[in-house]
Image (cartoon, rainbow, N blue to C red):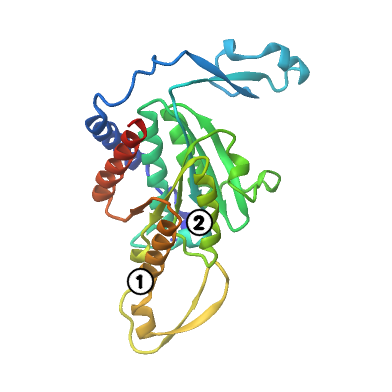
Amino acid sequence: MTVESAADLISLAEIQNVELVVARRMHEHMLGAHPSIFQESGFEFGGLREWQPGDRLSSIDWSESTLTNFSPLVVREFEQQSTARLAIVADTSLSTRCGMNGVPIAALIARTVALLGFAASVFQDYVGLITFDERGHQMDARPKVGRNHVLHCVRSYQDKVLSRGQHNTNQLHHTLAGLLRKISVVPVISDFLFEDYEKLLDEIQMLHSTHDAFVVLIDSSYAFELPALSDGWMEGMDVETGKSQLFSTADVTRIGASVSHWQDGVELAAKERGLEVFRVNSDSDRFHTEAIRFLANRRMKKWK
């Protein structure tokens, strides 16, 4: 079964399990550490946007809506000053379709989007989703608060990978900074299995001067641990470049190690740029434990 023909990258049951784990362990780590949401002076105006199902009637800006002839209605957004903004940047490039035993790299990215989103929702933080591939970056879900919006972010990522959602070329940006209007926490989730990954790291480094940007590196060597082959040659194609190449049996057995070595280089290059790196593997239990500890420690550092 190809990734495009799969029903979902991550099932609803898996999402609910991630949510339960996050709720339990984040509270364990952060009990007593999160400041009251009522400490600040109140709310500030966050901007205007089109009305969406579920918005309160009291949020409608009737004067602005008259300018659009009430189609669409325009609502005002207000943000609580004590909340943070999480702008999740997730890779949808072709290499994320690779995988083994029914677990593509994109499934680990989807799980990471869910975990980060639910961790933010514990503290009523705003969560948004930006996806990217070789064509550019696109805002798929503007920052909003709540569990349902986190689910929307996960579904948006899945739809993009599974070709159920297409890039709108009119909304593509060449830089992440062009999509980030306010200071945000920006985790960039990717396998970094493309030749010009240093260009992306340079962009994250520039973001980090204004935002809290860090790298979430999906450890992808498992996706290339191919079964043993009989002696001979096989032809393989690079899904990113479309180039074909002949591989010997010995070459095939070394692909997983080569991917691991490549990603070690990515991690080193990121750290040389002063970026924090969190490495994600396919062990879900270990991933949940390490990811929540990483997020909890990171948040507490910000309050010191």
Looking at the image, tell me whether mark 2 or mark 1 is earlier in sequence order: 2
Report the residue marked by disc 2. Answer: 201
Frontmost residue, 104 versus 32: 32
Looking at the rendered structure, the number of numbered marks drawn on it comes to: 2
Residue 77 position, x and y percent, is 57, 20
Q: Which amino acid does label 1 sit on?
A: Gly
Q: What is the residue that sits farthest to the left in this orientation?
A: 28
* Labels 2 & 1 near each other (Cβ < 8 A): no
> Residue placed at 43% from the left, 28% from the top?
125
> Residue placed at 44% from the left, 35% from the top?
151
Residue 82 sits in quarter = top left
Residue 2 at least partly seen: no
Report the residue marked by disc 1. Answer: 256
State which quarter of the image contains the C terminus.
Answer: top left
> Residue placed at 58% from the left, 41% from the top?
139
Neighbours of disc 1 within 10 Å: few (<14), some (14-19), many (20+): some
**SS at circle 1:** helix
Q: In this view, does 113 lie to the left or right of 141?
A: left
Cα–Cα span, label 2 and label 1: 23 Å
Q: What is the residue that sits farthest to the bottom in this orientation?
A: 232
Q: Is residue 134 left or right of residue 296?
A: right
Q: Is residue 251 above or below residue 296?
A: below
State which quarter of the image contains the N terminus.
Answer: bottom left
Residue 57 position, x and y percent, is 58, 12
Q: Which of marks 2 and 1 is in front?
A: 2
Residue 123 sits in quarter = top left
Residue 23 position, x and y percent, is 29, 31
